[in-house]
Amino acid sequence: MKRKIYDELLRWKEDKQNTCLTIQGQRQVGKTYIIERFAEDNYQHFIEIDFTRMPEMEKVFERAVDVDSVIKELSIRLNDAVFEPGKTLIFLDEIQECPEARSSLKWFAKDGRYDVIASGSLLGVRNTNAKKKKEENKKPLSPMGYESVLTMRSMDFEEYLWAIGFNTEILSGIKKKIGAMEPLDESELEVMASHFRDYMIVGGMPASVEAFVRTKQYSESGRKIDIILGDVINDINRYNDPVNALKTQRCFDSIPEHLSSNNKKFQYSRLEKGTGSRASGEKYFENLLWIEGAGYGNFCYGLNSPERPFKRIEDLFKVYLSDTGMLVRMMGTSAAMAIHNDDIGFNAGAVAENEIAECLSKSGIRPRFYRKNSGKDQMEIDFVIELLDECIAIEVKSGKERESPSVEKVNKVFNVDRRMKFENGNIHKDEEGIEHYPLFAAAFIDLLKRRYDGPAF
């Protein structure tokens, strides 16, 4: 499957600037696959070490003092391995299992004879499992300054369209219209909306997409997502002590319920009845951070104003799942059927909003939101984002309802540069100056940047 991150790997190879490369991201997003393919296309020799399958390799890096000692140990243990300077890629998979290996990236970067790529699924989490305490206390040196880091996520909508074989010339024309804010033809709109509904159900996890492409059955892709959800629980149990594992799983399982509520705010009272929000926050917030650090959730913080500079409210936030296909699977078969049938009777707000948050995050944009519950300026803005030098208020509409009082009045109260609505409709700008786009256009939000003649950022 074609992935955009491949081009970033090529850019790193061409201009490494004395760094190794680390690719982080949640499990099953295709990190190993894309690195193996990259190695096959660009190197004569490829050495792959997976620390989960080859735990004995940890000893190599625990004893090593430089690159030569690492290569010597690996040569002894890997009989058929060839280490040829300038033509060899060493791949250290699941590097979070061996902190000393990550420290060694500094040696390899300074040495320069061998290219090294590491990957890790849980580099952003704190391991609270008692069995790992001894390893954590070793405090290996950080490779800071000698490590380039890329975050890999599940497939975005455009990558999904490539996978299902969507005509690239037609897609190019549709993207051109989105960027120019030109209405789409009815056939273009209908077909793209249908594919986007499929994408919300199937999600972007490569195993799920492959199963759907191969069988055209939601049930087959759903079985793959069930396995992935099982892996999430396994990670929670493996990298947390028993108490924190229970709390973290409780937080994870509650995300669909929170997103299905009226305000979608994460509320601790849903986790534990009869406990004050402050006490519950102190009890569960680290567990939520674990979910975010493992790549399974996207935090969206509330703002005290939709104007810049943004100042977030620490105890006001929503938690979206990193992959909407996982959310739909957790919500059940009826949710998937309703989305497929475009059933307006189904409350699809949670799914649509999660998908837009996912599209924004995959575009490198941090979503935020604004809510004021009372007074004449009462309003609720689903997302507030920065797009280059502009502040944009976004509202998401999943059904046929068109009224949007909040986004209509926000610029009368605050200094907001642009207002957008993503909905089941075509591209246009109304008399109030609000830009309207179909839901799937959020996947191409980079095309909506206004021309900027200043320096690149």
Image (tube, rainbow, N blue to C red):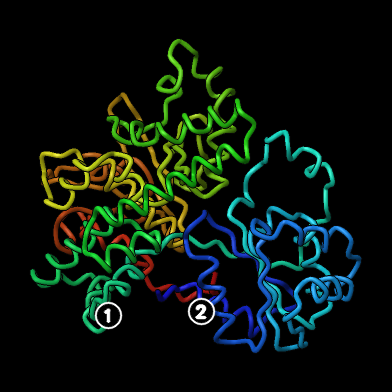
**N-term-proximal mark, 1 vs 2:** 2
**Up/down of 74 relative to 266, above or below:** below
Q: Residue at x 21, y 64 (%)?
A: 216
Residue 172: which numbered mark, if any?
1
Q: Are marks 1 and 2 in contact (CB under 8 Å)?
A: no
Q: Nearer the viewer, residue 420 or 219?
A: 219
Disc 1 or disc 2, which is closer to the eye? 2
Q: Residue at x 47, y 60 (%)?
A: 29
- Looking at the rendered structure, the secondary structure element under dot 2 is helix
**Up/down of 365 relative to 316, above or below:** below
Give the residue number, with chain letter if any, for mark 2.
7
In the rendered structure, the answer to whether residue 96 lies left or right of residue 368 reads: right
Give coordinates of residue 271: x percent, y percent: 44, 22
**Up/down of 227 relative to 116, above or below:** above
Q: Residue furthest top?
A: 274
Q: Nearer the viewer, residue 80 or 406?
A: 80
Local crowd at mark 1 within 10 Å, few (<14), some, or many (≥20)? few
Task: Place residue 171 in its image quadrant.
Answer: bottom left
In the rendered structure, the answer to whether residue 58 lies left or right of residue 446 reads: right
Q: Residue at x 36, y 32 (%)?
A: 258
Give coordinates of residue 268: x percent, y percent: 46, 23
Give coordinates of residue 188: x percent, y percent: 14, 71
Q: Nearer the viewer, residue 392 or 59?
A: 59
Residues under labels 1 and 2: Cα distance? 19 Å
The image quadrant where one finds the N terminus is bottom left
- As shown in the figure, which amino acid type bears the numbered disc 2? Asp
Local crowd at mark 2 within 10 Å, few (<14), some, or many (≥20)? few
Give coordinates of residue 352: x percent, y percent: 27, 48
- As shown in the figure, which amino acid type bears the numbered disc 1? Ser
